[in-house]
Amino acid sequence: MAAAKPVMVRAGEREVRVSSPDRVIYEATETTGEVTKLMVAEYFASVEDGLMRALRDRPTALERWTSGVRPGMKLATGPQDRNADAFYQKRVPKGAPDYLETATITFPSGRTADEICPTEIAVPVWCAHMGTLTFHPWPVRRADVDHPDELRIDLDPQPGTGFADAVRVAGVARELLADLGMTGFAKTSGNRGIHVYVRIEPQWDFAAVRHAAIAFGRELEKRDDGVTTAWWKEERGTRIFVDFNQNTRDRTIASAYSLRPIAGAPVSTPLSWDELATLDSPTGLNLFTVPERLASDGDPWATIDDVHHSLQPLLDLWDEHPVELNFPPDHPKMPGEPPRVQPSKKVESHWDEDGNRIEG
């Protein structure tokens, strides 16, 4: 059968060419229909208001599933995954249109790269043409790529917990933020978790924002015994993990209104706090339902940029207990960081305070 001809998709003031429009990206499920590449492009165009609020002027990595989403497919997370089915694109792909703008970011290694920096909806639609399902924006704007304007609180359910537990903890997080004089905005992760974002003044570097996230997680632990900031999985138990390292340089979270590579084409969906409190399952928030929801009710995050908070209340909490926690394994070793070895495998006498093994 001959391949379908490319289709032009209206995206703002532009027409964007989408090749292989009939390629199946998501297979049909019991509750959702089949999703083609054209439908993905049209979806991004239809959620312009919310998606561009999440992406505009932010350096953005792309999560590309060029062959679609199928059971058993794998996303490459490092050089060892060369045969994976999907991958992260951190540099501008070849063949980018001339209207696509960029931002230069610096990785923890000191290397730099030009990443896509969306300024109009035609850019995400073109990214759909390139097989992108999920956008991973940095928590910074192009004008200042070293000082985040977002604190990101990632509530990650561990085995034995679920979405309902994440919803409960999100409610406690909201109360804690209010006590600190901050306003948080919640969204589903597109899977079982919850993300809470707080706009902050872009005055602090990544290290300070990460310390603020650690301090927030520790305070949350005090208010709910179903919360943990333990980095090692074996120590987390059946609790909700506050992934503080999502605030580390070059660590990103799926944006609001991104699709996730899970059957049914779920969407990482912004919600009002009242909606979240009564939501039993996020599965109904998907490519088929979210555009109509956004068109009829508007974006629950419409006011997120109205106020940028000071990070100082959280940094004051950090100063009360400035004990460093582990960084991600691909991040350079940092001063004061605990040894990078699982607690169950650690032999105190064989490791120095910098995490280096002592021979003999």
Image (cartoon, rainbow, N blue to C red):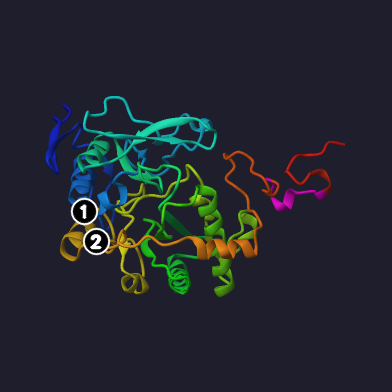
Q: Nearer the viewer, residue 62 or 30?
A: 62
Residue 238 visible to an observer of this rendering: no
Per the rendered image, the range of residues in magenta is 340-348
- In the image, is residue 198 part of the stretch drawn in magenta? no
Residue 208 shows in the view? yes
Q: Nearer the viewer, residue 199 or 356?
A: 199
Which residue lies under the disc numbered 1? 49
How far across and how far down the image is residue 213, in percent? 52, 58
Residue that label 2 marks = 299
Is there a contact, CB below 8 Å, between mark 1 and mark 2?
yes
Q: Is residue 192 above or below residue 146?
A: below
Q: Nearer the viewer, residue 243 or 158?
A: 243
Please name the residue shown 33% across and 61% down the image: 283
CA–CA distance between discs 1 and 2? 8 Å
**Residue 305, horizontal then vertical, whole percent:** 31, 58
Secondary structure of the residue carrying tag 1 is: helix
- The type of residue carrying mark 1 is Asp
Q: Is residue 347 left or right of residue 247?
A: right
Name, please, the residue furthest toward the right.
360
Residue shown at 24%/38% (left/top)?
123
345 in the magenta segment: yes
Residue at image position (27%, 56%) is 286
